[in-house]
Amino acid sequence: MAQNPFPLGKDELLKAYRTMRTIREFEERLHVDFAKGDIPGFVHLYAGEEACATGIMMHLNDNDRIASTHRGHGHCIAKGVDVHAMMAEIYGRSTGACRGKGGSMHIADLSKGMMGANGILGAGAPLICGAALAAKVRGDRGVGITFVGDGASNQGTFLESLNLAAVWNLPVVFVVENNGYAESTAMEWAVSCDSYVDRATGFGMPGVTVDGTDFFAVYEAAGEIIRRARDGGGPALLECNMVRFYGHFEGDAQTYRAKGELEAIRASRDCLTILSERVIEAGVIGRDELQAIDREVNALIEDAVRAAKAAPLPVADDLLRDVYVSY
Amino acid sequence: MSRKISMKQAINEALDLEMRRDPTVIVMGEDIVGGTGAQGEDDAWGGVLGVTKGLYAKHGDRLMDTPLSESAYIGAAIGAAACGLRPVAELMFLDFMGVCFDQIFNQAAKFRYMFGGKAETPVVIRGMVGAGFRAAAQHSQMLTPLFTHIPGLKVVCPSNAYDAKGLLIQSIRDNDPVIFCEHKNLYGLECEVPAESYAIPFGEANVLRDGDDVTIVSYGLTVHRAMEAATALAKDGTEAEVIDLRTLSPIDWDTIVESVERTGRLVVVDEAHPRCNLATDIAAFVGQNAFGALKAGIQMVTAPHTPVPFAPSLEDLYVPSADSIASAVRRTLSPKGASPRIAA
């Protein structure tokens, strides 16, 4: 076996691949099942963006908090939320992560430090400042990570939170998942600055831009700024340039994209292919080992869908439950 | 030991006692310490009206000044609550809710339900409400109906120092998000308040005056106007029962209905605008649940459907007065059907 040139050992590399593959299969399956009409409401898929969530979350433990977005499935899986509970939630079942009362846009598992996907764009940034403040008050070395897309990076909540985190010197990392589109509107048009690094500088914190389709680039950049935050060095911003394989939501015809754009990004910027080729070429992991993971992940997702479809629906009593802790 | 202190002092004392009792209680807001980062005195302000004055000397960095950035710090208070602290965030004037309402009604209020009962968000957001301070349209509103409309929020509005202390202590200990509404024209009002700690349970109205002829329900400043009206009416031989709601969500329906079933007449006084407020809510509830007991049409006395005016001559007409409450009571005493139509 060749010498490992990567910053992670083989087991960790396999874990990263498994996480990314799980997110991909989860989303591909939702794409198919949504089109069949099996899933209520609407879903926003993370396919294509797996390297970002995975490269960041590998530095975190259950004591670290994340605040996610409407496109949150990948963040949940990478943060360790149970895939069966997620699938059941998306199917609106009582066995779901939120007992069927949250749905795709509100999956949360506070025991895993996952403070919720969020249907309000940019809303997670103030919340994660609070999570980081709680960690700082307790002195438990926890960090908070909030994700926004390039679209929500223009929200006042996000910009105010950059300032607050800097003023209070909070252990927060603001991750901008720049997939080029705010729903259908181009980032190039809607974001006034040339670089998110400039924006970070304006708020008195370091900013880093990485190729978000390169797992290793994300992993290394995130590692450094998360360590810095954990050690009391304060907040930072990480921009991951990445690609979205599907529309803003399922059912989006994506007529705003250039001709051939989707085919091109799938062919050349698939983060899973990029990671696979790198580790295989380096001789660290065999293709058969990755294929074995693929088979296990397929079985896991298949089982999650089967279990979700068989699970009970919430009943009338559940409608009025849990509005308050006590009332 | 009991002594006379103002509502402002009572709120300060509640914060002090809870910070002593529980190290997870932190207090944040704009200028609640005052002068942070500046060259002058520490604790320069203690809040714009001095409500938190002196707490910094006792509790240090657990009192945190914030940038003028309501969405960020109210959201941070909510996030910290979801992660195990008990933050009390001062929003200065609750009119500023407009700047940060998403964090309150889409985030804090929904976490528990939306996450399947797995979240607790013990945050208190306190601030000033109400007119009569010559503070004009954006610093004088009684926005309580906006908050009572939202499932997941608890809403408190004390009318005196004793209640303010006990209700704020209960709010901090409560595990749901609480909007604590402090009428700025009651800050200076004194009453007997025990020095020790005590909590007043939510959902228990206070019957301030017994009477068998009519029930007057109110909260906040207008409770005092209702008491004035009741005193004036007693001279004419009409005995009004006056109920101070104290908490608007939850609300003490039982006390209201039991009283109306005895008196047969109801006047609801609300400093909020007339549409979809506490008065209409209570009138509808009584109409649905105690119709048979009513001897006359329910009367509502509210602020008009206008922004709060600045000119003192206008603002004095804006807040329900003792006279307007007494007139409303008299309308309930006139024969059924003889009431003139009252414009909203």
Image (cartoon, rainbow, N blue to C red):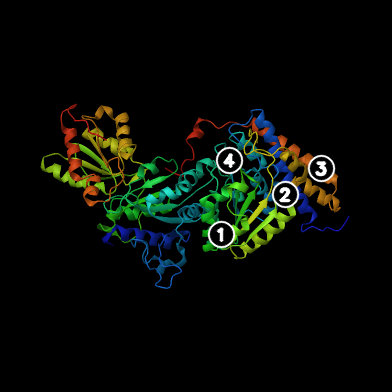
The residue indicated by pointer 2 is: A213
Mark toward the start of the polypeptide (3 vs 4): 4
Mark toward the start of the polypeptide (2 vs 1): 1
Q: Image height check: is B29 above or below A318?
A: below
Labels 2 and 3 touching (C-beta < 8 A): no
Residue mark closest to the camera, 2 vs 3: 2
Residue at 55% of width from left, 42% of height from top? A119
Residue mark closest to the camera, 4 vs 2: 2
Q: In which quarter of the image is the N terminus of chain A?
A: bottom right
Q: How crowded is mark 3: few (under 14 residues within 10 Å), some or many (20 or more)?
A: few
Q: Quarter-wise, where is residue B190 in the image?
A: bottom left
Q: Do labels 1 and 4 share a chain?
A: yes
Disc 4 to disc 2, C-alpha distance: 24 Å
The residue indicated by pointer 3 is: A292
Disc 2 to disc 3, C-alpha distance: 23 Å
Mark toward the start of the polypeptide (4 vs 2): 4
Disc 3 to disc 1, C-alpha distance: 39 Å
Going by the picture, which residue comes out furthest to the left?
Answer: B236
Amino acid type indicated by mark 3: Ala
Horizontal relation, residue B69 to residue B248: left or right: right
Disc 3 to disc 4, C-alpha distance: 31 Å
